Image (cartoon, rainbow, N blue to C red):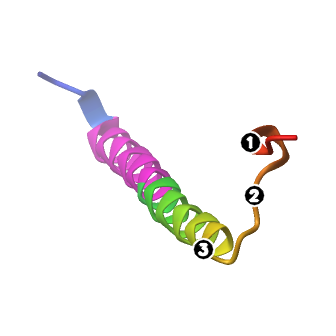
């Protein structure tokens, strides 16, 4: 595959885009784990969500 005289720029652009996407995925996974931990702590203390309250 011949990318022409701009091959370095094209490869760098794809590399940066891949890095950004990977960083966003990692951020979402880590934030999800943190939020689950926070919700677990709240539920252990007896705090419940309104949708799950039985009246």
Report if the CB atoms under discs 1 and 2 are less than 8 Å apart: yes
Residue 7, picture quadrant: top left
Residue at label 1?
A: 52
**CB contact under 8 Å: marks 3 and 1:** no
Q: Is residue 4 above or below residue 40?
A: above
Residue found at x 64% / y 66%: 43
Residue at label 2?
Answer: 48
Q: Position of residue 51 (x, y in %)?
A: 80, 39
Q: Which mark is residue 44?
A: 3
Residue 18 position within the rendered picture, expressed as x and y whole percent measured from the top left: 36, 46
45 in relation to 23, above or below: below
Q: Quadrant of residue 9?
A: top left
What predominant SS class does the magenta segment belong to? Answer: helix
Which structural element holds mark 2?
Answer: loop
Task: Say which element carries label 3.
Answer: helix
Residue 54 lies, in percent from the top left, at 80, 41
The front one of 35 and 6 is 35
Magenta-tinted stretch: 6-25
Residue 6's label in the rendered image is none
Q: Nearer the viewer, residue 17 or 36?
A: 36
Q: Residues within 10 Å of mark 3 (few under 14, many from 20)?
A: few
Query: Which quadrant, please, contains the N terminus?
Result: top left
What residue is shown at x 80% (from left), y 45% (from top)? 53
In this rendering, position of residue 2 left or right of residue 37: left
Indicate yes or no whether the magenta region holds residue 5.
Answer: no
Whole-angstrom CA distance, mark 1 to mark 2, is 7 Å
Horizontal side, residue 40 vs residue 23: left or right: right
What percent of the width, then of the height, locates residue 47?
76, 67
């Amino acid at each position: 595959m011949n990318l022409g005289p701009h091959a370095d720029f094209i490869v760098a652009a794809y590399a940066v885009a891949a890095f950004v996407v990977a960083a966003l995925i990692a951020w979402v996974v880590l934030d999800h784990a943190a939020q689950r931990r926070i919700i677990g702590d709240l539920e252990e203390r007896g705090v419940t969500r309104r949708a799950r309250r039985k009246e």
